[in-house]
Image (tube, rainbow, N blue to C red):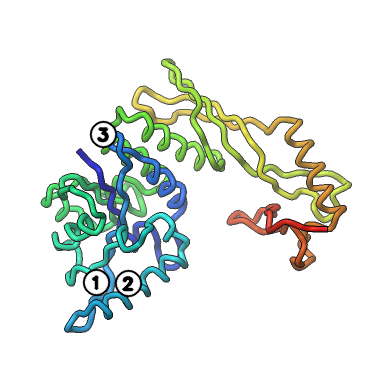
């Protein structure tokens, strides 16, 4: 029975100085995955990094590990592998590089769980590491730049939770729903997706939050600003639980009107920094650009008068 999800970092979760799309959503889902016994899935990072200059000492290893964690902080991924002394294992710790069996066995040991390598699923882009892990009795999934490449299981991290769910057992409804929520969120640009209903005919209903542009002459510089509103989603899945169609409904008129009045009030009270303004102490909101270039209203703090 699988109980541990191991992940590679370089060219698997990140490439160069960027995190691959949908990695964050996938990792959020994995944090809530459970085993067939109903226990939380243990997730850890197993990564090659520099080896110490001989002789290895605890102080040398600690310094290298600190540098690695700082690197991970820069990608915004540390939160998924805390406490780091348990959920991150480097070749530095083992004294050898992957795919040496010692690295993976040490990763299990650092997690502090009773498990063998046969209880582990490892995700990496490296085909040689995939082959070695299979020889160790581990389950594997290979990420790659294109699903057309031989041996690649997926090329989009929004699809990874569904593959992982199948590995851990397709009968585990919790994991299946989390995987479906990740796919829906990526497909419809929706966050915080929750599955509320799936019927025997394959219909699925869900809720989430999405950005919606609020417009009005009274909004001045804030005309067309994007705010986060609740949305309803409906779609259909096939017998294997794979998403076939999905549609996102427009937010309700009452939610849109409430958002308009909220933005208008912020503007009138001087509690939001517009595109032409710098954030000042006392302002509660700012405008930021997201990865798609959209102007998004974000809460910065609370104003006091």
Numbered badge on residue 92: 1
- Left or right? Give the position of 243 relative to 84: right
Q: Which residue is mark 3?
A: 37
Taking depth in this image into account, of 66 and 192 the one nearest to the observer is 66
Mark before the other along the chain sequence, 2 or 3: 3
> Which residue occupies 67% across, 59% down?
288
Taking depth in this image into account, of 208 and 39 the one nearest to the observer is 39
Q: Quadrant of residue 7?
A: bottom left
| Residue at mark 1 to residue at mark 3: CA–CA distance | 33 Å
Q: Position of residue 22 (x, y in %)?
A: 46, 49
Q: Which residue is mark 2?
A: 65
SS at badge 2: helix
> Which residue occupies 50% across, 42% down?
186
The reply to whether dot 2 and dot 1 touch (C-beta < 8 Å) is yes
Disc nearest the viewer among 2 and 3: 3
Callout 2: few (<14), some (14-19), or many (20+) C-alpha neighbours within 10 Å? many
SS at badge 3: loop
Q: Position of residue 5 (x, y in %)?
A: 28, 48
Disc nearest the viewer among 1 and 3: 3
Callout 3: few (<14), some (14-19), or many (20+) C-alpha neighbours within 10 Å? few
Q: Position of residue 51 (x, y in %)?
A: 23, 76
> Which residue occupies 54% across, 40% down?
192
Mark before the other along the chain sequence, 1 or 3: 3
- Left or right? Give the position of 249 relative to 282: left
């Amino acid at each position: 029975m699988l109980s541990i999800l191991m992940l590679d970092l370089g060219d698997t979760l990140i490439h160069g100085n960027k995190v691959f799309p949908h990695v964050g959503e996938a990792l959020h889902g994995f944090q809530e995955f459970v085993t067939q016994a109903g226990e939380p899935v243990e997730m850890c990072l197993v990564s090659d990094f520099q080896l110490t200059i001989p002789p290895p000492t605890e102080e040398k290893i600690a310094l290298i590990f600190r540098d690695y964690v700082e690197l991970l902080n820069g990608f915004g991924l540390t939160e998924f592998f805390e406490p780091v002394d348990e959920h991150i294992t480097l070749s530095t710790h083992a004294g050898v590089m992957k795919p040496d069996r010692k690295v993976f066995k040490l990763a299990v040991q650092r997690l502090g769980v009773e498990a063998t390598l046969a209880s582990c699923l490892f995700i990496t882009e490296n085909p040689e590491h995939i082959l070695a892990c299979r020889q160790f009795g581990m389950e594997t999934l290979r990420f790659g730049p294109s699903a057309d490449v031989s041996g690649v299981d997926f090329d989009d991290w929004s699809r990874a939770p569904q593959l992982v769910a199948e590995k851990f057992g397709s009968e585990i409804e919790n994991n299946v729903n989390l995987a479906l929520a990740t796919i829906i969120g990526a497909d419809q640009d929706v966050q915080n997706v929750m599955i509320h209903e799936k019927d025997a005919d394959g219909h699925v209903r869900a809720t989430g939050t999405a950005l919606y542009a609020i417009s009005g002459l009274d909004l001045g510089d804030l005309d067309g600003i994007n705010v986060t509103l609740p949305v309803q989603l409906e779609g259909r899945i096939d017998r294997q639980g794979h998403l076939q169609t999905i549609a996102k409904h427009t937010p309700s008129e009452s939610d849109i009107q409430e958002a308009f009045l909220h933005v208008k009030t912020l503007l009138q009270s001087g509690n939001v920094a517009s595109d032409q303004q710098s954030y000042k102490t006392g302002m509660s909101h700012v405008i930021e650009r997201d990865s798609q270039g959209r102007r998004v209203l974000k809460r910065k703090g609370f104003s006091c008068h």
